[in-house]
């Protein structure tokens, strides 16, 4: 465990060891007041008269020990925290690089909550180990060991009596450690269930309110929170008796030393000065020993989280090279492509050529594999079988950066950053001038709604683009793609949130932009792709037919079914509008 963490420390490893050494000296300084006390008490008991200078020097030794302990301990913690947060930075950077090499689809499957917990909560928990457990644990543990060795040189019989509290305290600590390890996984699982329920409760608040399901939703919310509380309390209650026992017994280093040591002195087996020295030194190591062992219960949690960190991003990296794109053209070709999510087959035997300068549409029922095919084209995942080529070059034989430079992908849900709409569009081409951005916005039919904003295109999108409607966000995303001017454009339900009037405008804008480019469109609304050069029909992960609208209506039963459903849906919408107007 320690080796894994220290591997991330790099140049900060030296500071971790230096912090441990400084804290070691600080703890050593805390022993000096007890040595000074022994030097004062022993001659007094023996009837010697002490001079003022002698008493003053020993008092200064006490003060020096206290000051030395405070100053060095603080300096040690400063060093350990600098090393800890430097190591956490390197750990997060390492995780970020590792995540960059993962398929984007895998990252999306893990969810933003899990990724956030990985980079924030789980990594932050390592701070206890790096800033405290390693340097403080080392210093506070080594000093008691050194003192105990010294005690054996002073009087081995008295030294044995001072060790009496250790077996009992350590047995209690190991019992608590065992309980903690046994239920650690269940503890984190209960916390995860509670967190998921809270997030679902908050995200689903609108549905809960609209459908008047407050009671049922809150009942589950309360049940999972109570379950977490009850499990945690039961877990802690099982540990508390052992925790109380070792906290009480471990510091009591005089448990047997005082009675047995006094008897040894009366019997003449030990001397009174040795007894006083052993008692003083035993008292000096009680607090360091307890502090060192107090980090032991946190080790099961740290071990669990290290394992979780390693497993979180434990997926095969995306297959790619450092090569640039050197394909001959913009033709996108799927050759016998198959793909499965874990063990569920979603695509099989796909052979499809999307030619440069043509508009190719993918249609099919939900779950037929359309969006998965589009995501494979932009290398969200590696194909399970076959290959995908762009201009004759396998997309796995180029860098993801090179591929992204050739393809513009616009999905149904587009994320906007909380900056101006101008900067959100400019992401398509960072070096673009304001005039170029404005032109892209105009061609994407954005000007109509931009005029309604007081600050126009300089309006902030809000977190995740919440200041805009779904259709407005999609037009900003399409403006981004227009500005990028990529060789291949993939629109995955990119007009889903657009009304009929604006969809027609958007289709005209897209038709102008994609001249001479490779265009792949995925749509549920078949009228929007009726005039495509080629329409490909997907059914249960297979490509069942392709052709023009007229050809498919004539020979493809699956397409006729989709077209009929689309026409009936359009009639239903028109009828619904008429009924609404009649009611008004």
Image: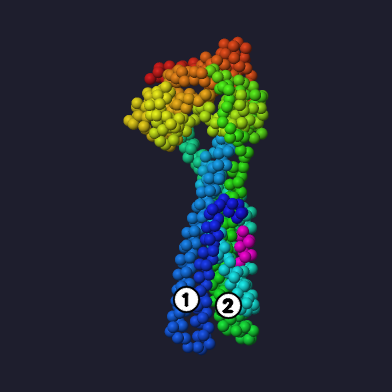
In the rendered view, would you say 234 is above or below 519? below
**Which residue is at the far left?**
454
Secondary structure mostly seen in magenta is helix
In the rendered view, would you say 563 is above or below 315? above
Residue at 52 percent of width and 61 percent of height: 19
At mark 2, the secondary structure is helix
Single out the mark in the foreground, 2 or 1. 1
Magenta stretch containing residue 176, yes or no? yes
Q: Is residue 152 left or right of residue 209?
A: right
Position in image of residue 185 (x %, y %) = 61, 50
Q: How far apart in space, not on screen, are marks 2 and 1 (Cα)?
A: 19 Å
Residue tagged 2 = 278
- Residue 126 visible at all: no
Residue tagged 1 = 61
User: Badge 2, how many Cα within 10 Å: few under 14, some, many 20+?
Assistant: many
At mark 1, the secondary structure is helix
Which residues are drawn in magenta?
A: 169-177
Magenta stretch containing residue 523, yes or no? no
Position in image of residue 576 (x %, y %) = 46, 19
Residue at 64 percent of width and 19 percent of height: 544
Which quadrant holds residue 239? bottom right
- Residue 134 visible at all: yes
Foreground of the two, 283 or 366: 283
In the rendered view, would you say 76 is above or below 498? below
On the rendered image, what quadrant is the N terminus found in?
A: bottom right
In the rendered view, would you say 357 is above or below 164? above
Residue at 40 percent of width and 29 percent of height: 433
Which label is found at residue 237? Answer: none
User: Badge 1, how many Cα within 10 Å: few under 14, some, many 20+?
Assistant: some
Position in image of residue 361 (x %, y %) = 55, 20
Residue at 56 percent of width and 79 percent of height: 277
């Amino acid at each position: 465990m320690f080796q894994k963490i220290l591997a991330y420390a790099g140049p900060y490893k030296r500071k971790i060891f230096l912090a441990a050494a400084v804290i070691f000296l600080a703890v050593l300084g805390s022993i000096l007041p007890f040595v000074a006390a022994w030097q004062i008490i022993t001659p007094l008991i023996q009837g010697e008269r002490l001079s003022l200078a002698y008493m003053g020097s020993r008092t200064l030794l006490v003060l020096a020990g206290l000051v030395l302990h405070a100053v060095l301990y603080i300096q040690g913690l400063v060093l350990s925290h600098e090393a800890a947060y430097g190591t956490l930075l390197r750990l997060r950077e390492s995780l970020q690089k590792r995540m960059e090499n993962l398929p984007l689809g895998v990252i999306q499957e893990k969810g933003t909550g899990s990724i956030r917990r990985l980079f924030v909560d789980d990594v932050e928990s390592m701070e206890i180990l790096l800033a405290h457990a390693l340097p403080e644990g080392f210093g506070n543990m080594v000093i008691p060991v050194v003192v105990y060795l010294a005690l054996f040189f002073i009087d081995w019989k008295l030294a044995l009596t001072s060790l009496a509290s250790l077996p009992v305290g350590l047995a209690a600590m190991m019992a608590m450690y065992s309980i903690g390890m046994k239920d650690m996984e269940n503890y984190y699982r209960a916390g995860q269930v509670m967190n998921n329920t809270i997030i679902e409760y908050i995200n689903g608040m609108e549905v809960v309110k609209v459908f008047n399901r407050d009671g049922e939703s809150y009942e589950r919310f309360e049940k999972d929170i109570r379950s977490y509380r009850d499990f945690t309390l039961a877990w802690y209650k099982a540990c508390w008796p052992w925790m109380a026992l070792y906290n009480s017994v471990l510091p009591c280093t005089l448990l047997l030393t005082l009675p047995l040591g006094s008897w040894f002195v009366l019997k003449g087996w030990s001397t009174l000065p040795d007894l006083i020295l052993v008692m003083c030194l035993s008292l000096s190591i009680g607090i360091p020993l307890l502090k060192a062992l107090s980090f032991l219960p946190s080790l099961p949690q740290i071990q669990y989280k290290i394992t979780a960190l390693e497993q979180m991003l434990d997926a095969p990296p995306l297959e790619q090279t450092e090569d640039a794109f050197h394909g001959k053209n913009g033709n996108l070709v799927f050759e016998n492509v198959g793909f499965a999510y874990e063990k569920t087959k979603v695509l099989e035997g796909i052979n499809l050529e999307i030619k440069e300068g043509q508009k190719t549409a993918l249609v099919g029922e939900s779950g037929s594999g359309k969006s998965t095919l589009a995501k494979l084209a932009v290398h969200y995942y590696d194909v399970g079988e076959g290959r995908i080529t762009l201009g004759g070059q396998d997309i796995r034989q180029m860098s993801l950066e090179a591929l992204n430079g050739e393809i513009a992908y616009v999905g149904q849900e587009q994320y906007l950053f909380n900056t101006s709409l101008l900067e959100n569009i400019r992401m398509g081409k960072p070096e673009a001038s304001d005039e170029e951005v404005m032109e892209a916005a105009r061609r994407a039919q954005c000007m109509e709604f931009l005029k309604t904003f007081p600050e126009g295109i300089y309006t902030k999108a809000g977190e995740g683009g919440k200041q805009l409607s779904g259709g407005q966000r999609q037009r900003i995303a399409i403006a981004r793609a227009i500005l990028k001017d990529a060789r291949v454009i993939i629109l995955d339900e990119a007009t889903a949130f657009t009304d009929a009037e604006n969809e027609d405008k958007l289709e005209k804008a897209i038709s102008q932009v994609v001249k001479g480019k490779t265009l792949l469109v995925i749509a549920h609304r078949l009228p929007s792709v009726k005039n495509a050069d080629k329409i490909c029909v997907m059914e249960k992960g297979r490509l069942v037919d392709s052709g023009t609208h007229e050809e498919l209506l004539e020979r493809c039963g699956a397409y006729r079914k989709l077209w009929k459903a689309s026409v009936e849906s359009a009639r239903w919408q028109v009828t619904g509008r008429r009924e609404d107007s009649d009611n008004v």
